[in-house]
Image (tube, helix red, strand yellow):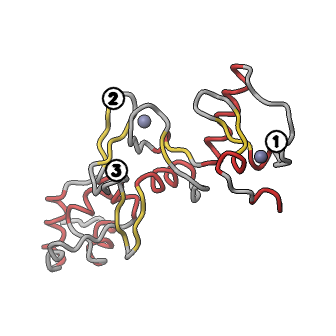
Amino acid sequence: MTIRTDVADLLHQGMSDRAISLRLHCDAKAVARARAALGLPKAKSGYRAAASVIDLFHDRTESVDGGHLRWTGYTSKAGLGSVRYAGRQYTAFRIAFRIQHGREPVGHCSSDCGMPGCVAPAHVEDDTARTRNRATYAALIGVESPAEACGRGHAAADHRRYRRDGRPYCLPCTTGTDSGRRT
Ligand SMILES: [Zn+2]
Ligand SMILES: [Zn+2]
């Protein structure tokens, strides 16, 4: 039989048949046959050799109408989905953000699409994206603020945030932190 080189490579790395079939979008039975032909032992049960944390993410999500994505993996008591990979814990929101933007999120990371806990990469925002989107919305509905700083001197460019309804507010003044003074 002809064995695909990409399949053979992953088999030699110790990945399970199922993980390989998910990663390469091929039939797990064909992977098992390739394993037998190469004389390799079955991957240890319970050993999850996912190629990346993104594979784990896709494994633990299911599509929902409207382009949303439900997290089916581990969820904390606080309702936050996460997954463990290579000794580190990653929240589902952060992985989703990385998939969409190719960078680490800044600050708080969550979705704002109307479906609680949705982890669709296109629906997850960090502080930067959320602020930009809401600023656009504020301008659209005519409630944007022309002031360059709040009454206490916090620069709007760094500290202005927007509520879901589009109303602007000053982050340090609202949260009681005053870190903006020094910058
Ligand atoms: Zn969504
Ligand atoms: Zn302020």
Tell me: is circle 1 under 8 Å from ligand 2.
Answer: yes
How crowded pointer 2 is (Cα within 10 Å; few <14, some 14-19, many 20+) is rated as few
Q: Which residue is drawn at 32% across and 67% down?
A: 50
Q: In which quarter of the image is residue 68?
A: top left
Query: Of the residues tagged 1 and 3, which is closer to the observer?
Result: 1
Quadrant where the image shows the N terminus: bottom left
Left or right: 131 as drawn, with respect to 47:
right
Query: Of the residues tagged 1 and 2, which is closer to the observer?
Result: 1
Counting from the top left corner in percent of width and height, residue 67 is at 40, 32
Inspect the image, locate mark 3, and give the three-letter code of the amino acid beneath it.
Gly
* Mark number, residue 45: none
Quadrant where the image shows the C terminus: bottom right
Earlier-in-chain disc, 1 versus 2: 2
Tell me: is circle 2 under 8 Å from ligand 1.
Answer: no
SS type, badge 3 = loop
* Mark number, residue 79: 3
Which is more toward the observer, 92 or 182? 182
Which is more toward the observer, 3 or 91? 91
Residue 26 versus residue 3 in the image, above or below = above
* Mark number, residue 150: 1
* Mark number, residue 65: 2
Inspect the image, locate mark 1, and give the three-letter code of the amino acid beneath it.
Cys
Earlier-in-chain disc, 3 versus 2: 2
Q: How many angstroms separate mark 1 from mark 3 (CA)?
A: 35 Å
How crowded pointer 3 is (Cα within 10 Å; few <14, some 14-19, many 20+) is rated as few
Q: Residue at x 55, y 52 (%)?
A: 108
